[in-house]
Amino acid sequence: TTAKEWDKLQSLLCFSAVDIPKEKRKYAVCALLLQDRAVSMAELGKKLYLSRSSAEKALEEAQQWLEKHGIRLQKKRGKGFLTKCSELVRRMTAAELFALYRSKSGIGTDKGFLTDVSRFLNGFDASGVLSSTANAEEEYGFHFAYNSRQTLLFLISFAIFRCRAKAPLTEYPLKNHQPAFSQRVTAALVQQLKRSYNVQIPPAEREYLLFCVSTCEIQEFDDTKALQICEQEEPQTLTAVQRFVSLASDLLGLDLHADSALEKDLFLYLRSAVEKLRYGIYIPNPLLAQVKEEYPNVYTVAWTASMLLGHSLQVELT
């Protein structure tokens, strides 16, 4: 039942009257509302051990947080509060909420991840997602970056969870540019997931999974050959990186091409970062203000070269 499902989620987040901080109360309310069902004020108080006034305050804070993510809260007479948003927004917001929870414990194990997803998604077994993703990584000889991989695993889990609940995405508008390497990885992943969960994955969900894979950063390849295959299938990004390094070398008076790791790391970072930008997902640079103030010459070179990079890749870099 839905009540039992929430109990699983509530036990995951470990909220109690004794140790729950106000910030976590807000996120607990958000998690409950993202279940896509009506939630009454009485239920909020009961599940989170809050007085009515505290529940009302937590709900107000949760509403503000959800609205910043494009989710509207609606009150239905006799039923409670409902969230109004697209399926995609619901998934992305749930993923952010999940990451906020996971961040408190630092880097965890796969076992810990499985436990968290199970409780967050009402008992869903994500072991098939873990094995399917690991098999795709092994087949193509690479490893996703840890934080990106955690987000990817949750988004895939949510997708399979919704497919099994007969509530898949009905459409997902991919941009015209679809990285060839990511397409092949996604195709392999989809086949693995279908076998693991015995579930049909409709076209819109496959496109969504392609988006998830293409925006997930690859940390490294097992060998040069595997990296070269990726570079050959995504020549636009590789060419843009080479031009960027050439221009930066000229401006700095240094031979940056001699640093092979620089080009490789830039390529791996930009292939996913640029895909995020294509979908309006902007990545803040925590060092930007410091570099601009303390290393103005380096900032000028980076800014000038990035204009060329953005033009080559048809995205706006800031």
Image (cartoon, helix red, strand yellow):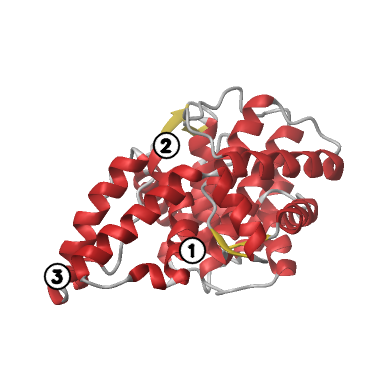
* Residue at 38% over, 37% down: 70
Which of 169/13 is in front?
A: 169
Which of 131/219 is in front?
A: 219
Residue 220 seen by the camera? yes
Judge whether 217 appears above or below 206 on screen: below
Q: CA distance from mark 1 to mark 2?
A: 39 Å
**Image position, residue 292 (x, y; %):** 16, 68
Of discs 2 and 3, which sits in the foreground?
A: 3
Q: CA distance from mark 2 to mark 3?
A: 42 Å
**Image position, residue 177 (x, y; %):** 48, 33
The residue identified by callout 1 is 264
* Residue at 30% over, 45% down: 310
Tell me the crowding category of disc 1: few under 14, some 14 to 19, or many 20 or more residues within 10 angstroms, Cα based.
some
Residue 24 shown left or right of residue 228 in the figure: left
The residue identified by callout 2 is 71
Toward the bottom, the furthest residue is: 294
Q: Amino acid at mark 3?
A: Asn
Of discs 1 and 2, which sits in the foreground?
A: 1
Q: CA distance from mark 1 to mark 3?
A: 24 Å
Which of 162/79 is in front?
A: 162
Q: Choose the circle earlier in sequence order: 2 or 3.
A: 2
**Which label was assigned to residue 297?**
3
